[in-house]
Amino acid sequence: MTRAKPEDDEYWNSSKFKAFTFDDEDDEFSQLKESKRAVNSILVDEDEDEDDVERVSWSGEPVGSISWSVKETASSIRSGSEQSFPKIDTTPSLSKQGSGYSLSSLFKGNLHVFIYCFLAFSDTSFRTYAPELRKPKSDGKVIHMDMFTSAFKHLGSPFSLEKFRSLQDKLLLLDEAVAVYDGNVITAVLIFLKKSLSKEILFRELMARDVALRHYVHYLKEMGEQKLLLMHYKEHLNIKDEGRRRDFLKSCLSLPFSQDDATHVQDHYTLLERQIIIEASDKKADAEIFKKFPRKASILNMPIITTLYYSCFYHYGESEGTFSSPSNIRKTFRISEKQYILTALGARAKLKSWFDVDSLFNTKNWLGYTKKKSPIGFHRVVDILHKNSAPVQVLQEYVNLIDDPDLKLSGALKYKCHDVVINTYRDLKDRQQLIVYREKLERDSPEYRKIQELLNNVQIRWKN
Amino acid sequence: MAHTEWKDAPGLPDFSLLKRLARDQLIFLLEQLPGKKDLFIDADLMSPLDRIANVTILKQHEVDKLYKVELKPIVSSSDQLCFLIRPRIQTVKWISDLVNADKVAGRFRRYKIIFTPQKFYACETVLEEQGVYGDVTTDEWNFYILPLDDDILSLELPEFFRDNFLEGDQRWVTTAGSALRLLQSVYGSFSKVYGIGRCAKMVYESWRELMEDGEQRTRQPEFAKVFLVDRDVDFVTPLCSQVVYEGLVDDLFRIKCGSVEFGPDVTSSDKSIKVMLNSQDKVFSEIRNEHFSNVFGFLSQKAKNLQTAYDKRRGMDIQQMKAFVADELKGLKQEHRLLSLHIGASESMMKKKTKQDFQELLKTEHSLLEGFEIRECITYIEEHINRQVSMIDSLRLLCLLSITENGLLSKDYRSLKAQYLQSYGIEHLLTFANLRQLGLLEEQQAGETLTVMESKVGKLVNDKTVGKLTDAFSSLAKKSNFRALSKRLALVPKSGEEYDLRVPRDMAYVFSGAYIPLSCKLIEQVLERDGWTGMEEVTRMLNGQEFAVTGGSSSSEARSKTDAQRIVLVMFLGGCTFSEISALRFLGKERGCRFIVVTTAITNSSRLLEALLDNSA
C-alpha cells in the first residue's frame, strides 16, 4: 500500500478534501479521479520491468548490452504516434459472461449456501489495529505508524488509502480498482476495506460486485479465514484422529447442504463410523483369513467401494446384521447390483473362490435349472477373472457365456480357451481357420487331436 | 532444427535473450544482499531456475547452501537468508514464522524475499501483520518468460488456471500483460492483436496500459500478429487423450519444464535418465509431432539407417577408420543413444496403453466428440468408475461427456456422481463443486429452476442488485454449445471416411483424424479472415468476448512483406497442450507461417483436472 509521507499534510489542510460531499458533478468527478490515481499508485511494480531493460550495469555483466542494444535500436526507429493500440470494451457484461465468472456459479443453485456464507463471516474475528500502532500527531489527528517507515517505493505518490473514509469513497475506490483488472490491486483495496468496514456492510456491498466478491473470498480462503459451506466440510481432511474426524463429520450433518450433497455427507459420516468399528475388531481378529492374507493397511478413510471389497474379502458370508458384512454395506450405501457384482467378483476371484464366483451369477428358473446371468457383460467378467489368474476351465465356462460372437471368439483366442475357439470355428464351418489354429497348438495335445478329428469328419460341409 | 523442415519458413527470433535477461536480473538481486547467504527456493521454481542458471553461477554470487522450500522448520547456520519464491501467502506466513522464531531465540539474521515474477500486496500485508515488515526486505525478480524450445515460451504459472478461472482472482492478469510487454520491448512491436475470452481482453488492456505508461520502443518487429485465447474457450481439447508423440510422452511420463525422466522400464537398465526434449534432440524433433502409429515405423527405419552407417566401418582401412571415428562416430553414437531411448519410451507407452484398454477408451472419446452412441458411452464410463480404475480418467470422461452434451441429464448426473463418490471417496464432493462452477461437469438445468431462484434471491437483496443478479443467473443457462460449434466449424470429420495418419490432411490428425482442436481452428479461421467477420454465430456460441485490433496508423504495409508478418504469437491463458502445439506447427507448415506459443504453463488432462481436485488437505 502506498502511504503518504509524514510531512505530507495536503489531505488535512487542503480544502479540496475537506468534506466528501457529492453536491455537484465536479466533486464526484474529482473524487473518481482521485480513486483512480490512488488505485494506480498501488500498482506496486509499475516501473519495475521498465528498469529491467534499462539496468545497464547489472553487476557489470554484458547483459546491460542487450538492453542497450534494444534501446538504441528502438530509439532510432521510433516514430511518433506509432503503436497506439485502441482501448477495447472490457466491461464485464454479465449476460455475456461465462458461468465461471458469475455470482450464480459461486453459489450455484444454492441460496442457503450464500446465506451460510454470509453468516459465517459474521463470527470471523475481526482484525483491529492495536492502539499502540497509532500515534497521535501534533495536531491530534491520527496517522498510521507505517507512514514513518521509509521502506516503500512510491514516495512520489501522496495518496494513502486511509483517506477514503466515507462508504461512498470506499466503494468508488473499489469500483475503480475493479476497472483496472489487476487482481493485485483489487485485493489491496479489499484488504483496506476489510480493515475499515464492518463485515456486514462489506458483504452487503460485495454481493453486488461479483469480481470483487470473488477476489475477497479467494483472499480469505488463502488466509485460512474462509468458511464457505464446502470449505467447512473440507476441514475434516485436516483432522488426523479418526474419532475426532468422525465427530466433526457428524457436526457437518446439520449444515445446509443441498439435498443431494446432504445424503453424501451423511454417507461419509456413516462410513467412517462403520470403518472405526470394523477396524477395531479386525485389528485383533485371528480368523484364518486374516492369517492367510494379512491386512496391508487399515480400512479407515477408504472409499465405500474399497470398504465393500474389503468386506467381500474378509467378511464374506456374514449375516446382514453385522456392520462388516457385504450385504449390510451394500444396503446401507445403496450400492447398485452391477457395482456389487463387480466388487464381489474381484474379491472372490482374488481369493480363487470359484464357487463363490459361480454363485454370484447363478439364478434358478422356475423349473429349478440354474442359469448364469450377469448385469455386466460376461466379457468383462472374463477379463476380471483372467486378471486374477483364473484357471482355463473357469475362464472357458465364462467365455462361453459371452453373447456377442465376435467378443466371444476374441476372448477365447486371448485367453487360450481352445475348446471354445474350436467349436466356434466348427460352427462357422471355417476349415481354414481351424487349420491355422491347429498349427498353434502342441502336437498330440487333446485340442490338436480334436481339430484333427473334425477335419477328418466327412459329414461337415466346410465353407472353405 | 525443426524449422529447416520446410523451405520458405520464416526464421524464429532468438529467445535465449530472455534467459540472459532473467539470469542477469537474478544476479543483480543476489548482489543486493552482499556476503554469504543461504538460498531457499520454491520447489516449482527449481526446474525453471535450472534452465537459466546453474549452481556455479549462484555460488559465484555468494550463495552458500541451497534449500528447497518445504514449509518446515529450517536448519541453517547462515546469517543471511534469501528466499526465492512465488508470491504465495502460505510461503510468506512460513517465512514470517521463521523470523519470529529467530527473534524469540534472540538470533539476528538478515532476510530477503525475492518474489517472482512479481510481488503481491497481500503477501506484504502478511509480513506487516506478522510484525516482520522491515525485518525482511523484499524484491522482485521479473522472470516472466522461460523459453522451453524454439517456439514455446512458458510463464511456468500452472496456478494461473485455477486462480483465474475457478477462483475468479485476476492477480495474474498484469503478469501476462507484462510478459507481452517484455516480448514486445525485446523483439519489436505487434501490428495486430486478436483474442477471445474475458481474460484475454483484460490481458490485452493491461498490456496496452503498460505500454502507454512506459516509454515506447519501436523497432523492426520479429513477429507482428498476436492471438490471445482463454483456456475456458476450449475445454474439450485438453480433455482428450493425446496421441501425437510429444503429447503422449507428456500424458504418460509428464514433461516438466522441457525435460522428462524416463524410468528403468524405458532405459532397460536399473536407473532413470533425465532427458531434455526439444528441437536439439534430432530424433525427437522428427517424431514429436507425429501420430503415435507412425512412430514405430519411423524409429525402425532410423535404426536400420544407423546400422548401415555403422556397417560402413567394415572393409575400411586404417585411414578411413580414423576419419570415421573422428567425424561420424560421435554423431552416430549420440543418435544411437537417443534412438534407443525413444524406442524404449515407445515400447513402454505401448505396454501401458494396452494394459488400460486404450483402444476402448479412445473409442469412447471419439463417440463423445461425434455425439454417437451416448448411452453406450455412459455405460462405459460407469463401469470405468465401478472398477475404480484411474480416478482422473473417470473424471476426464465425465467432463467430456458433460461438455459435449451440454450437461448431463439430472438422473445421469446424480447417479454418476454418487457412484464416483463411492468409488473414489466422498471428499470429492468438493471436486464436483469446482467442476460445476467451472462449467466442466454440469447437470442440465430445467428452465423453471431459474425463475424460482431469481424470485427467491430478488426478495433478499435490494432492487438495484436484482437486475444484476438476474443477469448473473441467466448465465446459468450458459451452454458449451460444443455440438453446434463442432458442426459450424467442421471440427469432427464425417465418420466412415478413411484418414491416412501418415499423410495428415488437416489438424485433426493430432486426434487420430477424429477431431480438430477447437482452439486451433479458431486461430486458423481468424488469421484467414484477418478478424472475426463472418464468425458471429461462432463467437456468440462461445459467449462473445472476441476482439481484433490494429495498432496505430503505422507503416504496416511496408512491413507486410517481411518475415515478421508470418510469425504469429499465440498466447494461451490457462495453459496449452502439446497436441495444440503440434496442430499449430502443422497449420504453420500448411500456411507458410510459424507459430510461437506463449502459455501460462504446459497442460494436459491430468494437470487440468488435478488443479481442480479438492480431495486432500
Image (spheres, grey):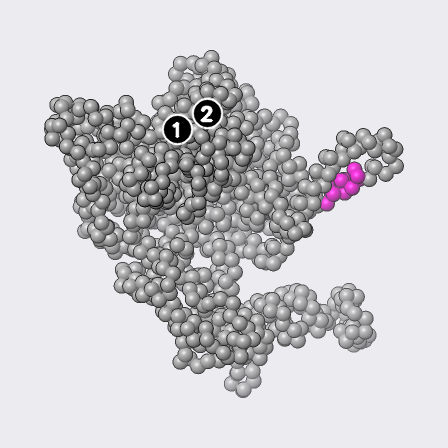
B98 or B397, which lies in front?
B98
Structural crowding at the residue carrying mark 1, measured as other residues with C-alpha within 10 Å and reported as few (<14), some (14–19) or many (≥20): many
Name the residue at 35% across, 22% down. Answer: B213
* Residue type (three-letter) at the residue carrying disc 1: Trp
- B158 drawn magenta: no
Which residue is identified by label 1?
Answer: B207
Q: Residue furthest front?
A: B106
Q: Secondary structure at mark 2?
A: helix
Q: Toward which corner of the image does residue B539 lie, by quadrant?
A: top left
Q: Which residues are magenta?
A: B300-310
Which quadrant, please, contains the N terminus of chain B?
A: top right
- Magenta part mainly helix, strand or loop? helix
Q: Is residue A275 left or right of residue B449?
A: right
B368 or B149, which lies in front?
B149
Q: Toward which corner of the image does residue B196 lie, by quadrant?
A: top left
**Alpha-carbon distance for marks 1 and 2?**
10 Å
Q: Secondary structure at mark 1?
A: helix
The percent coordinates of residue A36 (x first, y second) are: 26, 28
Which residue is identified by label 2?
Answer: B184
- Asked if residue A337 is positioned above or below residue B268 in the image, the reply reads below
A349 or B559, which lies in front?
A349
Name the residue at 58% across, 58% down. Answer: B356
The percent coordinates of residue B120 (x first, y second) are: 35, 36
Name the residue at 50% across, 53% down. Answer: B368
